[in-house]
Image (cartoon, rainbow, N blue to C red):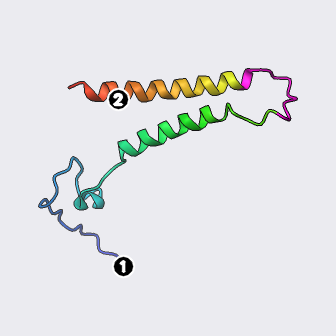
Amino acid sequence: MAATELEPAKSAGVVTKVDPAEVPSAAWGWSGESRRTFRIAGWVVVLILLAMLFENQQGHTSGTGYTGYIFLIGFAVALAGVLIRDSIIRRKPR
């Protein structure tokens, strides 16, 4: 049967905003998500969306016209707007 007593948390080491008793990886100096990684991934998605505009034009027989292009550009602009807004807000002191 498992013990019901908890081990006491060690407060020495890296100072984080997270209690190491709740998140064990905080004791190693890492906890949470990497904001920089998500920003880079966001810009990669924007580039991929814009790269989809350069498709193969040989079999262009769909009757939708430019609707797909409008949605690709719209989503890319919206995502770029969110990323730019995040970078502006991040620079301002609270």
Q: Is residue 59 magenta?
A: yes
The residue pinned by badge 1 equals: 1
Of residues 59 and 81, the one nearer the viewer is 59
Q: Where in the figure is residue 45, as x and y percent of width and height? A: 54, 38
Q: In the rendered view, does 4 fall on the left or right side of 77?
A: left
Q: Quarter of the image for the C terminus: give it.
A: top left
Circle 2: element type: helix
Please give the label number shown on residue 87.
2
Q: Which residue: 26% across, 57% down?
A: 26
Q: Quadrant of residue 73?
A: top right
What's the amino acid at mark 1? Met
Q: Which residue: 35% across, 29% down?
A: 87
Q: In the rendered view, does 27 fall on the left or right side of 60?
A: left
Is 25 situated above or below 55? below
Q: Quadrant of residue 71?
A: top right
In whole angstroms, how far apart are the C-alphas of marks 1 and 2?
A: 51 Å
Q: Quarter of the image for the N terminus: give it.
A: bottom left
